[in-house]
Amino acid sequence: MSTSPAPNGALDTFPKLLDHNARVRGGRPAAREKMYGIWQTWTWSELREEARALAMGLMGLGLQPGERVAIVGKNRPQLYWSMVSCQMCGAVPVPVYSDAAADEMAYVLDHSGAAFAIVEDQEQVDKLLQVVELEQAPALRHMIYLDPRGLRKYDHTTLHAFAEVVANGQGAAAEAGPRIDAICAAQQGADTCVMLYTSGTTGRSKGVVLSNDNIIVTARATAEFDKLVETDSVLAYLPMAWVGDFIFSMGQAYVAGFCVSCPESPDTMMSDLKEIGPTYFFAPPRIFETLLTNVSIRMEDAGTFKKKLYDGYMAHARRVGADILDGKPVSAADRAKYALGELLVYAPLKNALGLSNVRVGYTAGEAIGPEIFQFYRSLGINLKQLYGQTEASVFITVQPDGEVRADTVGVPAPGVEIQIRESGEIYYRSPGVFQEYYKNPEATADTKDAEGWVATGDAGFFEEGTGHLRIIDRAKDVGKLSSGALFAPKYVENKLKFFPSVLEAVVFGADRDRCVAFVNIDLSAVGNWAERNNISYASYQELAGHPKVYDMIQEHMEEVNASLAQDDMLSGCQVHRFLVLHKELDADDGEMTRTRKVRRRIVEERYAPLIEALYAGASEVYASVEVTYEDGRKGAISATLQIRDAKVFPAGAKVAAE
Amino acid sequence: MSIHAAEAASDDVAYASQEEAHGIEPRRIGGTVMEMKNITLRFGGVTAIKDISFDIKEHEIRAIIGPNGAGKSSMLNVINGFYHPQEGEIWFRGAKRGPMKPYEIAQQGIARTFQNIALFKGMTTLDNIMTGRMTMMKTNFWQQAMWWGSAQREEVEHRRRVEEIIDFLEIQAIRKTPVGRLPYGLQKRVELGRALAAEPKLLLLDEPMAGMNVEEKEDMCRFILDVNDEFGTTIALIEHDMGVVMDIADRVVVLDYGRKIGDGTPEEVRANQDVIDAYLGVSHD
């Protein structure tokens, strides 16, 4: 057994936190995963033993302190604790997006100089072998895989089964144990904890180096802020390479000691969510949108009685639900009706969504539609927004309970200072501020100044009175139209995306006389709408080009224009002409980041002829774009797209927006 | 689906290159498991199969191909005892097989899937695969109805094996979905799961890829190769897609109008003039 790290004040690294948890709550569940249809549980003391055994095995393979270890795979408890195992050896874990193509992975492996890789299965092994074969990862010495399926006949000189490494580690405990204890005892809060690669909204991704203090101090402060305790429970389903997952499923879980459950497979996430019933839930707006879309579609298909019941009580919930949640005064009659609704509609619905037990829910990453946000809040789910970045260890601002609104991102998180500079750009300074961009001092200097202030790249302002921060757009995307009026594309796009039928929108107009837009339809929402309206279609492309779909998008566009017209600052951003793209914007084509944010520049380049046609006044345009399939093969999708004009409204006009 | 397909596609490529690159021996093909000697099958005046002999070796993937009406499905039905040939002998694992009922043959370790899916549409994926273990259940109806003692223990054990198959075929997400609601490609996969649940020595697949799109085919190819590789199951399959057959089969037997016109490795069969004639439609005299 290890020498126990002493006082509470010294819990400044993950290995020490793990020891602590194994000691004070050793019997409580730390991780769960569904295997063969049954939830398997590891307690904190079991998890500690597993992590130590793996660490000793890694040491046996020659992992040296200071080296980097790539972690590639979907959310699995073993992969989570392998990050701590790496830290026990003094190495730095580098989680990598598991859906990245081989060349993207090659970049991260090469740049991080990873010496080891711990991967999930054959798919990832093959990808990494491809990288190795092309000699793009010179530093990579050993690869360890979790799922042996299909790998039996691979050359095992540098490839190892996870179970075998663990078994070897257990065998070497007498020799390796004390070495690990010595390394763990010597580690400090200022040491590097993890390296996370940004999703790269702009250009190549950068390796963000975060220290133990960054993660643990931030996690501790925010866990206190939301009163997270060891009985809480989360479902870990977001990419492990994303800083949010690292904070929620590692940082806060280790600090508060709660249990992290991993879904059986990505496809079963919804049913696993229902079975686990997490108390603390994080999802990007897209997940909440998808959930709501599914509910709406099913209610459209439900019988008359059920539909009436649902519509009636949901209308009531929209009226008083959020106020009840915020503890504002609501009449006794309304409360009684809400209680009945809870019994008949809200509780069963929350149960079906897997959100019955949610005490604290967060959404971040993108703006969320006010209707969507309100829908969940009115059901009594405490959904809040936060604003964050990898460079900040997530938290910059966060909404306190009772001060939750759709259009702001809240007040500065505990310990965070915020400045708005003249340019309108938001700067922050906090204990979570990253150490540096790995091997990129210029970028570090560009982003972080000597006093520790970090530029977010976003433009925003503090609201008068409430002190809540409002984000307008990416600072560098905020531009001017040729008339000199403010151009904030994201703001307009978000308004468009709040319509269920619009999946994605890209607005152009910087240095032009007016704005134009690309629209992506949401296949499930529009498909269902088409079904109900007897519109037949054979493909996404055909549906996207359907005149009736265009009519609907045009209506939405004009509604957005009408609401923009009322905003003095942004009335110039009304969309004059638009087209519906014949393919979904896709991360595999480089059009989006892996976290599904549009890469504006690349879209602009790839679709330049379409933009020209929008400005040239043509009524249709032929488009052909190269697409990359998930296995790396390339093909082209072409179509003739219609272009429509949308009605614009004079600035300041009071149009009756419905 | 698309994710799986992409995996399958990249896996296949990598799989092949892996074996070549590291010079690892492919799966060891053993002795003869099943031998068909001079089989002739008639329906009244129609001769569906005429004097056909071929063998199936242990651990191999044996494909049976041929144009429509060549007698492929009849051949499969002879192997698993649906049809009894008028002439000829069937030798299975070193013993001559007498007339047997299909369930007796199933108990011998021969499982199959069907050209037209034959699942219980109203039952879930899990229950359908569970039926594949029927031949191995030892407790009787009344014990199972009471679900106590040995019946319960037995079901837990069977369920464990079924869950392993669900994991293997990556169909966790549809575990509790009635199969009638599933898309065609997934139903085919469930059917494969049910056949695997019987832990067959010899697995017969009747057009496992019929009516599938490219993605689904790639998926299915990967599963067939994985079954063969991981469990060492001998597989006999009928398939129309020549690309698939040439890629995954170890040996191919070609039928035409109930006669055998070719037998050998995919390369040999491809070079066989009779086979080319049959497929290109040269007139027969």
Image (cartoon, coloured by chain):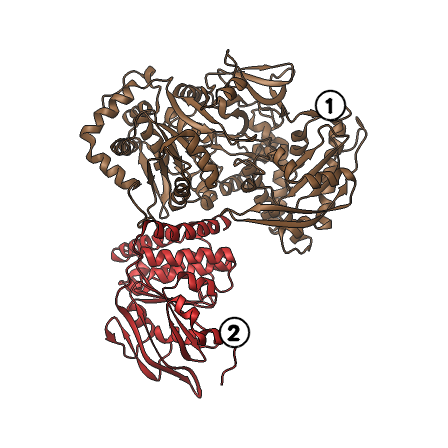
Kind of residue indicated by mark 2: Leu
> What is the x, y in percent for residue A240?
43, 34
Residue depth check, mark 2 versus mark 1: number of the one nearer the observer: 2
Picture quadrant of residue A383: top right
Q: Is residue A497 visible?
A: no
Q: Residue at x 64, y 42 (%)?
A: A520
Residue reaching furthest top?
A451
**Residue bearing the label numbered 2:** B280
Q: What shade has chain A been given? A: brown
Q: Is residue A89 left or right of residue A524?
A: left
> What is the x, y in percent for residue A606?
63, 40
Q: If the image is split into quadrants, where does the N terminus of chain A sit?
A: top left
Residue reaching furthest bottom?
B45
Count of all numbered marks drawn on residues in the image = 2
Picture quadrant of residue A191: top left
Q: If the image is split into quadrants, where does the C terminus of chain A sit?
A: top right
The vertical placement of A591 against B93, above or below, is above
Kind of residue indicated by mark 1: Met
Q: Residue at x 45, y 45 (%)?
A: A268
Q: Which one is in front, A22 or A547?
A: A547
> What is the x, y in percent for residue B46?
45, 85
Q: Is residue B228 visible?
A: yes
Picture quadrant of residue A555: top right
Q: Which chain is red?
A: B
Helix, strand or loop at label 2? It is helix
Q: Is residue A404 left or right of residue A220?
A: right
- As drawn, the label of residue A569 is 1
> What is the x, y in percent for residue A149?
34, 49
Please determine if labels 2 and 1 lie on a single subunit: no
